[in-house]
Image: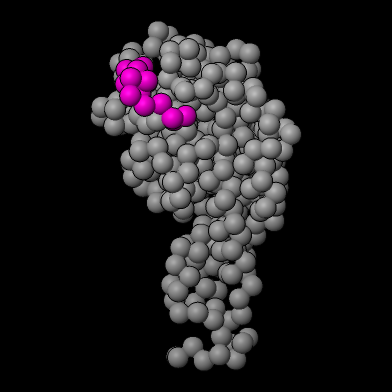
Amino acid sequence: MPNAISGMNDILGLLERLPGADTAADAAWASRDPLLTKPPGALGRLEAISRWLCAWQGRHPPTVARPRARIFAGNHGVAALGVSAVPAEVTVQMVANFAGGGAAINQLCRTFGIELAVIPLDLDRPTADFTRAPALTEAEFVAAFRAGLDSVPADTDLLVVGEMGIGNTTPAAALPCALYGGEAAAWTGRGTGVEGRALARKTEVVAAGVALHRGQPPLELLRRLGGRELVAMAGAVVAARLARVPVLLDGYVCTAAAAPLEAAMPGALDHCLAAHCSAEPGHRRLLERLGKAPLLDLGMRLGEGSGAALAVGVAKAAAACHAGMATFGEAGVSDGG
């Protein structure tokens, strides 16, 4: 990964150099798919997923043999403002739970053969309260972005990106609100389960942060309204693109973290699929703005990369069908031609 990232301009420079899809691998997919023993389009989105894997892995046929999950953890200054139903120390406790194998993401990674790494980011130093100041200094932003850049081994063939951070659905709501406009209430959901006055307070915090920082460039909004784990997820998404690794985005927080990349450089998320649609109402609205239809819609809102890990099973199925199915000629089946 690039080792000369020292400021925002360097990150913008990376975005300007992102590689595109591999046209030769895409053409190879397009040549093989019509020959497989099925009616055209009969596997629905599985066909589109296998084609996406080819184009962004840069090879044909696609494989999902080395999927990896990278879960970033951070703490937020706005958690002290009553935006969450659980205390901030739960972030540290859940990181310990991940290490002990007791979380949902552990079970899903085990089930689908995903290598899991959890990366805590200065959990003893919450971000600043973004209703009063930028959440991160530029140096803190760069350090978190580099943590994401450095987290993706080059031989990864599919990346799951996720997070853990009490209070982080608040910056997740603030970022698209600042990027795309609209009322704070339209982007703010229950998160850990807040309701009533607590939900109203969370919405007020989102509105106050957006009012203070609105109008800034996209990556600057990520610095001012995000958190270390959001910035690191954005870094991992960029690292994956540079290494030709397709990405499954998890829920609302993950998608909100990636959205400034697309706003800064249209096409920056072309190598990403939305793994699922969260029960957070703002997530569906955000996916619509990004033009990404979710693979799954199961009412999940856990975070941890859980929805994206579940979608790895779908990606594995797509790759296996395209690579393993017999052609009409091989199977001795008439294609009706």
Q: Is residue 314 magenta?
A: no
Q: Nearer the viewer, residue 92 or 232?
A: 92
In this rendering, the answer to whether 328 lies above or below 224 is: below
Q: How is the image coloured?
A: one colour
* Residue 311 in view in this figure: yes
Magenta span main SS: helix
Q: Is residue 193 left or right of residue 166?
A: left
Q: Is residue 77 left or right of residue 266?
A: right
Q: Is residue 200 magenta?
A: yes
Kindly identify the residue that appears in the image at 63 percent across and 48 percent down. Answer: 108
In the orientation shown, which residue stands out farthest toward the right?
100
Task: Quadrant for the N terminus, please.
Answer: top right
Kindly identify the residue that appears in the image at 36 percent across and 43 percent down. Answer: 284
Q: Nearer the viewer, residue 267 or 67?
A: 67
In the orientation shown, which residue stands out farthest toward the top?
132
Span shown in magenta:
191-206
Kindly identify the residue that appears in the image at 56 percent across and 14 percent down. Answer: 126
Give the total number of marks visible in the rendering: 0
**Looking at the picture, how far across and down is residue 43, in whole percent?**
48, 70
In the orientation shown, which residue stands out farthest toward the front?
196
**Looking at the picture, how far across and down is residue 46, in whole percent?**
50, 64
**Looking at the picture, how far across and down is residue 121, in whole percent?**
63, 22
* Residue 6 in view in this figure: no
> Residue 314 appears in which quarter of the rendering?
bottom right
Q: Is residue 3 left or right of residue 169?
A: right
Task: Quadrant for the C terminus, please.
Answer: bottom left
Q: Nearer the viewer, residue 18 or 300?
A: 300
In this rendering, the answer to whether 92 lies above or below 328 is: above
Kindly identify the residue that appears in the image at 35 percent across and 38 percent down. Answer: 281
